C-alpha cells in the first residue's frame, strides 16, 4: 500500500477505514488494533504530515485535482 496516493487510483486490501482527518483517535486505534487499514484524506501538505505522523495511518489520499501534493518533500516537512 502506498504511503501517499491520489484518491480513486489505489486499491486497498480488504475494506479500509477512510477518515477525513486524524481527530477521531478512538476510531483510528480500534481499526488499527483489528488490523483494518486506516486511510485519511488530505488536501494540504500540513494535513498529510499530520496524518502520516500517526502510526495507525496506512495511507493518505489526496484529491485528483491536487496530485501535485504527491511531490511534497515529507522529510523536509517533518524534520525541517
Image: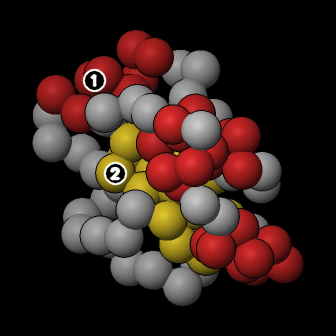
Q: Nearer the viewer, mark 1 or mark 2?
A: 2
Instruction: Identify the element where label 2 is drawn.
Output: strand
Measuring 24% from the left and 45% from the top, which residue is drawn there? 36
Q: CA distance from mark 1 to mark 2?
A: 14 Å
Measuring 40% from the left and 62% from the top, which residue is drawn there? 3
| Residue 41 drawn at (x, y percent) | 63, 52
| Residue 68 drawn at (x, y percent) | 75, 76
Circles 1 and 2, Cβ within 8 Å, touching? The answer is: no
Q: Residues within 10 Å of mark 1 (few under 14, many from 20)?
A: few
Viewport quadrant of the C terminus: top right
Q: How many marks?
A: 2
Say which residue label 2 marks.
Answer: 58
| Residue 42 drawn at (x, y percent) | 69, 51
Instruction: Identify the element where label 1 is drawn.
Output: helix
Q: Residues within 10 Å of mark 2 (few under 14, many from 20)?
A: some
Measuring 44% from the left and 33% from the top, which residue is drawn there? 53
Q: Is residue 9 left or right of residue 12?
A: right
Viewport quadrant of the N terminus: bottom left
Residue 30 numbered mark, or none: 1
Residue 43 visible in the displayed image: yes
| Residue 79 drawn at (x, y percent) | 51, 37
Amino acid at each position: 500500500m502506498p504511503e501517499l496516493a491520489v484518491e480513486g487510483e489505489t486499491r486497498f486490501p480488504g475494506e479500509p477505514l477512510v477518515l477525513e482527518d486524524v481527530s477521531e483517535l478512538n476510531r483510528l486505534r480500534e481499526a488499527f488494533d483489528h488490523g483494518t487499514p486506516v486511510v485519511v484524506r488530505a488536501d494540504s501538505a500540513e494535513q498529510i504530515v499530520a496524518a502520516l505522523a500517526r502510526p495507525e495511518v496506512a495511507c493518505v489520499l489526496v484529491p485528483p485535482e491536487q496530485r501535485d501534493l504527491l511531490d511534497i518533500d515529507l522529510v523536509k516537512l517533518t524534520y525541517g
